[in-house]
Amino acid sequence: MKMQRRTFLATAGATGAAGALGFLGLDLRPSAAYAQQATPKKGKVTTTICPYCGVGCGLLVTAADGKVINTEGDPDHPINQGSLCAKGSALYQVPNNERRLTGVKYRAAGSDKWEEKSWDWALDRIAEKIKATRDETFQTTDSQGRVINRTEGIACMGGAALDNEECYTYSKLARALGVVFLEHQARI
Ligand code: SF4
């Protein structure tokens, strides 16, 4: 059977049921039944956004006893409607990973050693560096005397894990500092 991609997506989206793919000779009902069984019956479920790419798929995360015990696509999320790619499906490996860094590591200029630091120390250090760099590089006028009030000494970059409100706040902060090199990896 010949079918355009657009027709396929429209049909699959309209039905939203595993059995609806029968026209392709696929019977997904066993998979759907297994997925329902596999959903944990305990723990607290919260929603989150996949941090890996700019698509921004939504996930349901189940945690119990201080540990993530399940992640799956959020069927109510408007972007992915329950689906996840292979990377997003493996997201539970991020929190449940003995190699995950959970604290601040600092290597001073010229040093060959990493030091453990507190989050408060890191925030203060970042604030001090931003302030010093801005003070040193702030330009009030350009070469023709026009007011510009900007710094070219700092660049800011957002990422796919930031939601709309965080991006809005982040861009306001950057603009208030006079940052002109402001970018975002997701571009959505
Ligand atoms: S699940 Fe896949 S497509 Fe969706 S945001 Fe994550 S990496 Fe991107």
Image (cartoon, rainbow, N blue to C red):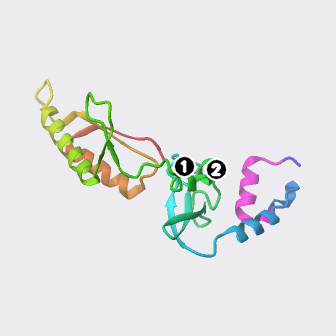
Question: How far separated are the C-alphas under marks 1 and 2?
Answer: 10 Å
Relative vertical location of residue 52 with respect to residue 39 in this rendering, above or below: above
Residue at 52% across, 47% down: 52
Q: Position of residue 70 (x, y in %)?
A: 60, 64
Give amino acid for label 2: Cys
Q: Pick the residue in front: 184 or 69.
A: 69
Relative vertical location of residue 122 with respect to residue 49 in this rendering, above or below: above
Q: Which mark is residue 55?
A: 1
Give amino acid for label 1: Val
Instruction: Report if residue 136 is visible in the image.
Output: yes
Residue at 85% across, 57% down: 26
Q: Position of residue 48 (x, y in %)?
A: 50, 61
Query: Within 10 Å of the Cα at label 2, are there few (<14), some (14-19), or many (20+) other Cα atoms?
Result: few
- Judged left or right of residue 175, residue 64 is right
Instruction: Report if residue 17 is visible in the image.
Output: no
Q: Pick the residue in front: 164 or 14.
A: 164
Q: Position of residue 159 (x, y in %)?
A: 42, 46
Q: Which residues are magenta?
A: 3-20
Report the residue marked by disc 2: 85
- In the rendered image, which quarter is residue 29 located in? bottom right
Residue at 75% across, 53% down: 7
Which of pointers 1 and 2 lies earlier in the amino acid sequence? 1
The answer to whether mark 2 is within 8 Å of ligand 1 is yes
